[in-house]
Image (cartoon, grey):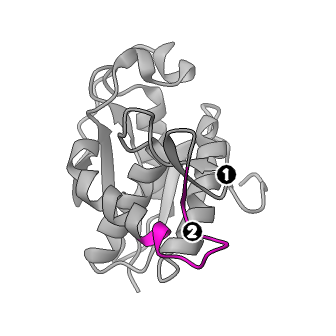
Amino acid sequence: MARILEAGHYYLAKGPTQWSLMGWKLMHGLRRNGDASLLFVDDIHSAAEAPKPERELPAITFAPIADFRIQESWLVDESWRALDRLKRLSRTKRARWSRGAWYCSGARLTTVSGAPTCVLYDLGLTIYKLNQGFRSGINILPEFWEPQQRRVVRLITKAVPEFSLEVVLYDLNSRFWNLDDGQEQ
């Protein structure tokens, strides 16, 4: 079965950095025959909202050819569908309204202003991948996304159990490891 490999993320307001290029190269090393590639571009958040390791690097030229190119703003509807799935879970597992926002399994899903958080957008992106016919995938992300990806994996297990997600983290020294085992490859 073909997988979908997500890599090369960047903030449109900032532009791609060495992190984007490193992730894209790693994706090509992990890609198997029949796998699809997905480039995710955050067109919602400002450059100032990017993680510090992203902000500290200069923008670079980066024009990868991807099977799918998704902008975060396109995922609003899928994000709300993801929240609906979480609200319909069993009483002990479902999303709950607290302190002016939605939460589930310790993850904040909406902002106080009512917008989806990155975790909810990622869950919406997973539903998008599922709707494209994929049942498994790999998110290839810089190491500083580890805490957020742990929350995403936990929520996917609850809300989208028919999708199998692996997360590969990497640093700028060409080291990479699986989120689950932490073993460097």
Quarter of the rendering containing residue 77: bottom left
Residue 66 visible in the shown view: no
Residue occupying the point 48% across, 83% down? 162
The residue that disc 2 covers is 94
Quarter of the rendering containing residue 36: bottom left
Q: In terms of depth relative to the viewer, which is nearer, 172 or 168?
A: 168
Left-right relation of 6 to 44: right
Q: Give the Cα separation between the discs numbered 1 and 2.
A: 11 Å
* Segment colored magenta: 85-97
Number of residues whose C-alpha sits closer than 10 Å to that of mark 1, classed few (under 14), some (14–19) or many (20 or more): few
Q: State whether residue 170 is above or below residue 125.
A: above
Q: State whether residue 75 is above or below residue 159.
A: above
The residue that disc 1 covers is 106
Q: State whether residue 168 is above or below residue 118.
A: below
Screen quadrant of the C terminus: bottom right
* Percent coordinates x, y for residue 54 in the rendering: 49, 23
Q: Nearer the viewer, mark 1 or mark 2?
A: 2
